[in-house]
Amino acid sequence: QVTAFESRGRAAPLPRLLHTADSSQLEFLVAGVAPRGNGSRFLLQLATVEAAGAARRLRSQRSIDDEYTPSIFQVLSLLAESQNSSSTLGFLQWKATAYGSPSPRREDGIQCRAGELQVANWTLPLATVIQAYFGDSLGSSCTISALNVSFGGEEGEVYQEKRYLSWSVLLGFGEPPRDTFSPLVISIAAVALGTPLAVLLLGTCVLLLARRRRYSEYEPIN
């Protein structure tokens, strides 16, 4: 399922990826597929094709902010960068989680892991949209890279219970959007950090005034 956007914002369901008008969201679904074992894990291989002058790089970022995706603190981005400059040409971005329900909640999370980005030692099928786009340069001047994304883990039994898996990834042009602290989080942090400081300053002022008053009550002998 592919969703296009016309402005900056967030989708309503989890993982609530931040999107822009230059990006679209791709949702990968697995529903009703019976696992072959008690600890079965699903794996999705992403193949990317880059023309001459571009290179792929996998970037992992961690943050203490989980306001929009509770208990998830890692964001991964697969970037296409120009070899002649530091500019980003395109990206794929996702959070390190999938979900086991059509109406996902925090407890429906399924562990998501990304492997290392490697140069693929195989060729793509000829009758594809990629072949039509790149033409004869696909096998000569283009580079094919592959990345494995796995779902599930030793402790995860969400898919075995509900037989449903949903993973969302954002793809677009330019630099991927970055999450920032919302005004609500900034306000809460300011109150949490400012209140103890204000109490400390107030207590210090009261202590100094009390000490000064005590010394002022003594009368000189002469």
Image: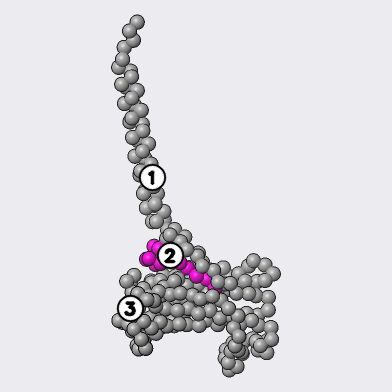
Horizontal side of residue 146 vs 201, given as left or right: right
Residue 200 lies within the magenta run: no
**Residue identified by numbered label 1:** 194
**Mark 2 and 1 residues: CB-CB less than 8 Å, in contact?**
no
Give how far across and how far down residue 183 sits, in percent.
Answer: 41, 56
Q: Quadrant of the C terminus?
A: top left
Residue 20 shows in this picture: no
Quarter location, residue 71:
bottom left
Q: Residue furthest top?
A: 222
Image point (65%, 87%), residue name: 138
Q: Amino acid at mark 1?
A: Gly
Residue identifier under label 3: 157
Q: Which residues are magenta?
A: 66-78
Question: Which residue is identified by label 2?
Answer: 73
Q: Does 31 sit above or below residue 65?
A: below
Reading the chain from its start, which is encountered first: label 2 or label 3?
2
Under mark 2, the amino acid is Phe
Q: Position of residue 173 (x, y in %)?
A: 57, 73
Q: Secondary structure under badge 3?
A: loop
Would residue 72 be counted in the magenta stretch?
yes
What residue is drawn where x is 59% and y is 88%? 122
Q: Amino acid at mark 3?
A: Glu
Secondary structure at numbered mark 1: helix
Marked residue nearer the N-terminal end (2 or 1)? 2
Q: Quadrant of the N terminus?
A: bottom left
